[in-house]
Image (cartoon, rainbow, N blue to C red):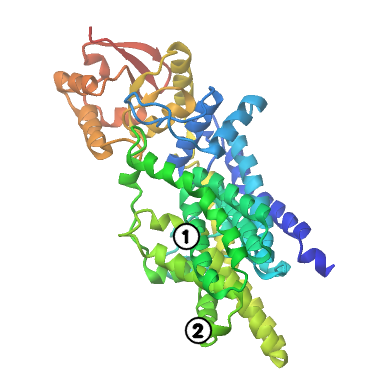
Amino acid sequence: MKRFFNGYGFAAALGLLLFAVTLVPYVTAWNAQDSEHDFSGYLHFSEDMDTYAAFVNQAEDGAWLFRNPYDTRINPDEYFNPLWLTLGKIKVLSGLGFPFLLQLLRLAAALLTALGFVFMFEKLTGRRPPGAATALFLFGGGLGWMLIVFVHPYLHAPDIYSELLPFFSVGFVPHAAFSVALLMFSLGFFFDALKNGGMRAALTSGLILLLLGFTRPYDAAVGLLLMCAVCSVEVIVSVKRMNVLISALAPLISLPSFAYGYWLTNFSGGFSVWSQSNQYPAPALYLMFTALGVVGLCAVAWVLLGLMNLPRLARSERIVFLWLLLAWFVMLSDRLIPWAFRSISSFLLPHFIATVFLVVFLYERLPRGRKALFVVLALCAVLMLPDAVYSMQWKIREASERLRYYFVPPDMCSALEWMDEHYREPQVVYTHGYYGLKVPVYSRHVSVVAHKDLVRDFKEKLNEYNRFASSVNRRERLEVLRGNNADLLLWGPFDRRLQKQPPEEIKGLTRVYENSLFSIYELNFQ
């Protein structure tokens, strides 16, 4: 029985339970649909999810490389992402829509996160983690919920940073959870190669990291840096230097994905705009430790104990020690590494492993205090669980209230689908930014104002749209449409809120479609 609770079967069961629990907000959202609200299928990061849905559409249409779905310029297909490519090909074979494909991704992320944690821990330490540790890794959280209770009752995310905790990531940011799971498997094989000198393990680790580098380079970069740091230290202190050299193949194999990612975000025609937007300041330390909660405090305690015994640390302890230093260095290097904050997805891992090490250390060194230790651990577990409860409450409330970020008007879908049927060649659509995000999701066309991180000069285009919508100068409005090479004008409720003059007043516009909420105008400047 003990072997089961510490094994892969129990981890898989926990993964399925995690998927089932986090399915509740989605069921709530589907049940909340009515004649005016269609559920989009996702409950977080709607801008990014719209982009991923557009990539899946491109893959469904036969693409193997993606183009920027929010760039009105003609650019070659140049973005390779195995995850969205695979989902697009599954869509072709199964006929499933993006909302259901996202649930398949959540299921895979839940199982792989649970199994990956056990696998990585076993390869690192030589033994599987206690079942309770796996359960807390999947369902536990930090102390962000205290900010809701004691500071601000309407604070949104109880975990403070949405991709930090596996529970929230699996539930609502599944591509991040899936990527961290790949990272754990890659590191697990790397640790195995480091210990046993297995060429197959090193190659497998490298190939997984290569795949991850194409899928989500932020997480892969953490793995690459950790592997390089570990190899640099172990080649000095280890007696099995050949094992270190073999394991060094893993980071070497992954390098092409990083070279490609650097080119894509700095020199490609369609995606270099990413490097201008993916720049985030380092988070405040008190918020980071609040988000980590008990795990962060335990990791600090373990580091302090390790410093007192540094020369005698075991290899697994040296690796976790290095990992913690590296994780904090990257997180606080926002001026040196623009994407540093995006490493938040894997930030929990070394802190949680350090916490397990601390508990094992105390259990072995304090035989007479084990009952007190169990009581303290139970209290810590109680402090870690409310984050999940508040996360569920938050998302169920958003689903029940039909938040517009996750629900779309059926009339908008009908208008865009009509557009897709009647215009086979890609059209440049001018519309409100909210509708612009949905244009490549429900059609194969592109919008001028849409994703703030993928539209070049987004702020200028947004200000230009606001002037266009509220202007009464026909010539000015016409010049805006001409300047953006617009083919179609999609006019809906958000546009009408700003308008002072209906589109019919603009010379060269012909209304070609209309339903109760939306109109489509064709532009002809000949």
Q: In the image, is residue 133 above or below residue 338?
A: below
Residue ID at (29%, 36%): 456
Q: In the image, is residue 425 above or below residue 74?
A: above
- Determine the image quadrant of residue 47: top left
Classify residue 251 as left or right of residue 494.
right
Q: Secondary structure at mark 2?
A: helix
Q: Quadrant of the C terminus?
A: top left
Q: Nearer the viewer, residue 228 or 512?
A: 228
Residue ID at (52%, 81%): 301
**Mark 2 Cα within 10 Å, few/some/many (few <14, many 20+)?**
few
Is residue 401 at least partly visible in the picture?
no
Percent across and percent down for residue 494 are 34, 31
Q: In the image, is residue 188 above or below residue 275?
A: below
Q: Nearer the viewer, residue 492 or 459?
A: 459
Percent across and percent down for residue 150 are 45, 71
Q: Amino acid at mark 2?
A: Leu
The residue lying furthest to the right in this view is: 1
Q: Earlier in the sequence, mark 1 or mark 2?
A: 1
Mark carried by residue 432: none
Is residue 195 at least partly visible in the picture?
yes
Q: Nearer the viewer, residue 184 or 286?
A: 184
Percent across and percent down for residue 337 are 35, 57
Q: Secondary structure at mark 1?
A: helix
The residue lying furthest to the top in this view is: 526
Residue ID at (61%, 42%): 105
Residue ID at (54%, 49%): 253
Classify residue 339 as left or right of residue 296.
left
Q: Amino acid at mark 1?
A: Leu
Mark carried by residue 225: 1
CA gap between label 1 and label 2 equals 22 Å
From the image, tell me which residue sits under label 2: 307
